[in-house]
Amino acid sequence: MIYSQTLTDRELIRRFQSGETNALEKLVHRYKDGTYTFILSLVKERHTAEDIFQDLFIKLFESLRQGKYKEAGRFQPWLMQLAYRLCMDYFRKTKRGQKWQDKYLQEQDCPSLFMSQPSDMGIIRREISEQVRKALDKLPREQLEVILLRHYGNIPFRTIAEMTGCSINTALGRMRYGLQNMQKMMVEK
């Protein structure tokens, strides 16, 4: 069965739980680019990001099948929260939580981020993306986490605060200072 873009996340989840496995494929397809980019931005290793991404969708499959997802109309933030937890588990297991090394995404790592455009616009977009990645790379980890969770996951600040173990005001402050720091770096450049 082919699903139109008009089906909501809730409808796709219900269809999957009713036995239509294609509904889960549609749901995964809807969020795969942003979720993979988010994971890769945190772990910064393509192979590791792919492993975590696969683990995420196995966990998603199991959670939906077992009815662990409580319908709140907010599937994407819930999915990003699962991705964040898996990344933090990875950091705890490998004791890499403080390192955050290597470089951010390269164009070949996630080509869907770089849509085909006229050559001048594509060049400008790549240059801006590279400057943003360099600025993100220089941010403190706490600011980076909040920006990535908010930008890629569209997660509310209250949920980000719970996920990162800080108050909502601290999460808001980290976002504000992170964006201010990036703006300063971009202006200096």
Image: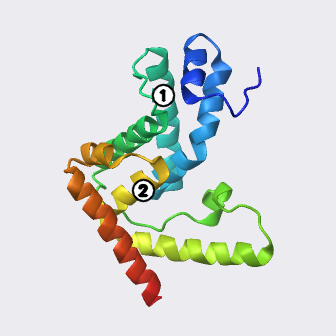
Residue projecting furthest to the right: 118
On screen, residue 18 above or below 172: above
Q: Is residue 124 left or right of residue 133?
A: right
Q: Residue at x 53, y 53 (%)?
A: 37
Element carrying mark 1:
helix
Q: Which mark is residue 10?
A: none
Q: In which quadrant of the rendered image does the N terminus lie? A: top right
| SS at mark 2 in the image | helix
Q: Which residue is mark 2?
A: 148
39 or 152: which is nearer to us?
Answer: 152
Q: Which residue is mark 1?
A: 60
- Left or right of 100 in this view: 169: left
Counting other residues with Cα less than 10 Å from the Cα at mark 2, is it few (<14), some (14-19), or many (20 or more)? Answer: many
Q: Residue at x 58, y 10 (%)?
A: 18
Image depth: mark 2 or mark 1 in front: 2
The way the protein has been coloured in the rendering is rainbow
The span from disc 2 to disc 1 (Cα, nearest Å) is: 20 Å
